[in-house]
Image (tube, helix red, strand yellow):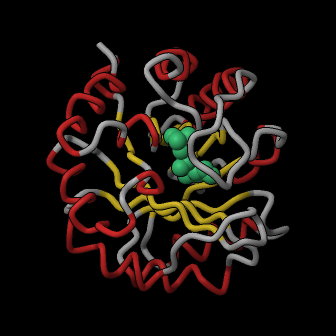
Amino acid sequence: MTSNIKIAPSILSADFANLGQEIAAITTAGADYIHVDVMDGHFVPNITIGPDVVKALRGYSDKIFDVHLMISPVDPYIESFANAGADIITIHAEATPHFHRSLQFIKSLGKKAGISLNPATPPCMIEHVMDMVDLVLVMSVNPGFGGQKFIASSLDKISTIRKMIEKQGRHIDLQVDGGINMDTAQSAIDAGANVLVAGTATFVGGPDKYAENIKALRGK
Ligand code: DX5
Ligand code: ZN
């Protein structure tokens, strides 16, 4: 069961002066997805990177680029991230009143569509878009920064969404993001997550440790 667990290192914790090499290093170390956190200083209180940086980084890995958009509005930027080489584009249910439309747009561009929920947002928010998503992202911290503490109530939400996914009868990734480390990873897996995002816990110790860190997160 745990062999199906995918690890998505968040490059938010990488050396930003050396991002291309960092992405190549985590690819060699066994990352499944490259998790790219896009923040706008409006939807979340931090600013990171835009589509031109994603495009520049695309050539450093053949892994799935999993782009987590923490931006509002989101619609005007979806196509730029698709063109930059995103494979999965995840938007926040709280970032737009029309996320059904945004998800349709992502799918129309031939990309996988993800929907994310902040810690205070209930699973029922996404009940009526479950038929169109490829990934559900449960935020286990309030988005904006790496290195925060895992919010334990996320586990119940993961279990609930795992049941919603089972009802769909097709594969949908269930991703958890925030505060995932050697102590919290297994509980997220047990609750039903199959993709673990990890920034701090992947990049701690520098490139020599990446393979060991990723292996430890994946579980037994
Ligand atoms: C937070 C981001 C996360 C973050 C995770 O807003 O979406 O991807 O980088 O960082 P850690 O693993 O350090 O909690
Ligand atoms: Zn993220």
Residue 157 relative to residue 83: left or right: right
Residue drawn at the location 26% of the way across and 58% of the way down:
22
Where is residue 52, by image quadrant? bottom left
Vertical arrangement, residue 72 with respect to residue 124, above or below: below
Q: In which image quadrant can residue 20 be found?
A: bottom left
Identify the residue at the far left of this view. Answer: 28
Q: Left or right of 200: which side holds 211?
A: left
Q: Residue at x 51, y 29 (%)?
A: 193
**Foreground residue among 89 and 26:** 26
Above or below, comparing residue 115 to residue 199 in the picture: below
- The image shows residue 208, relative to residue 54, as above or below, that is above
Q: Is residue 131 visible?
A: no
Q: Position of residue 12 (x, y in %)?
A: 47, 56
| Residue 102 spot, x, y in % from top left | 67, 72
Q: Is residue 15 visible?
A: yes
Q: Is residue 112 left or right of residue 63?
A: right
